[in-house]
Structures are given as C-alpha cells and as structure tokens.
Amino acid sequence: MMTFETDSEAGVIEFTVDGEVSRAEYDAAAAEMDTVIARHGKLNAVAVVRNFAGMELAAWWKDISWGVGHLTKLGRIAVVTDIGWIIAASRATSWMVPGEQKLFTPEELEQARSWARAS
C-alpha cells in the first residue's frame, strides 16, 4: 500500500510505502506529483519506506516512464528507511537523479521533512 500527503504551499509530497504498491495508488500519486511540478516547477519529496513488497507490473512500468520523463523536475528526495537493500539501491542509483537525494533513518523523519522543504 502507498499513501501520500501533499504540502502544496511548500511543493513537497510525502509518500509512505507499507506493502505492495498498486497501479491505482501509483496513478493517484503521479497525478499529484504532476500538479506539484506544474505549480512549483519541481518536486521535492519524502519517501518513507516501512515495508516494500513490490509493485504491480503496470505500476512499475508507469514509475519508470514517469521518472524518465520528469528527471529534470526532481529537487530534493529524502528516502526514509531502515531496509538494507533499499538503502543500497538508493545509494547505487543516486547519481542518476539530477536533484539531491539523501538517506534518513526512521528516527530521523522530522529531519528528512525539514531537509526536503529547505530547497
């Protein structure tokens, strides 16, 4: 399951992933991300990953195509997790994101939120 909250004034979306992400959940998030980008010119995000049990194939494909099409619109991305393979994957792919990406532990959630809003 993926949920999200938007701080429209700051241009920040906070995602929480706890389980499998469905296409419907991803579509709703992608629409909201597009709205933030239209208003602010870029997207800052906090991604809280508690448990990741995968994505529906259609959501995975949409994520890749959305990401490739919006790479230059990404600002600060705070990844909040204590899941080892997500940390490793984030570090390994951070060079691909033109914006900034920073890892935080779950105990550092408030710092992650502040950092994402500080740009």
Image: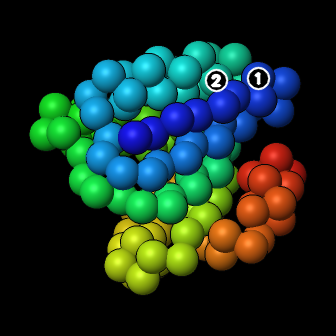
In the rendering, at what x and y percent does residue 63 appear? 30, 39
Image quadrant of residue 65?
Answer: top left
Residue position marked by numbered label 2 in the rendering: 36
Task: Tell me which amino acid carries mark 1.
Answer: Ser
Image quadrant of residue 8?
Answer: top right
* Pointer 1 or 2: first along the chain: 1
| Residue drawn at x 36%, y 79% as measured from the top left | 85
| Residue drawn at x 61%, y 72% as measured from the top left | 103
Query: As drawn, is 52 to the left or to the right of 23?
Result: right
Task: Tell me which amino acid carries mark 2.
Answer: Val
Residue extending furthest left? 57
| Residue drawn at x 83%, y 65% as measured from the top left | 111
Residue position marked by numbered label 1 in the rendering: 8
| Residue drawn at x 71%, y 37% as measured from the top left | 12
Camera-side residue of 112 and 96 = 112
Q: Is residue 77 visible?
A: no
**Badge 1: few (under 14), some or many (20 or more) residues near its Cα, within 10 Å?**
few
As drawn, 97 above or below 83 = above
As drawn, 20 above or below 10 = below
Query: As drawn, is 20 to the left or to the right of 10?
Result: left
Tell me the quadrant of the picture where the N terminus can be found. top left
Mark pair 1, 2: CA separation: 7 Å
In the rendering, at what x and y percent does residue 44 appear? 66, 43
Check contact, mark 1 vs mark 2: CB within 8 A.
Answer: yes
How many numbered discs sit on the rendered protein? 2
In the rendering, at what x and y percent does residue 28 appear? 44, 20
Q: Is residue 29 visible?
A: yes
As drawn, 28 above or below 72 = above
Camera-side residue of 52 and 111 = 52
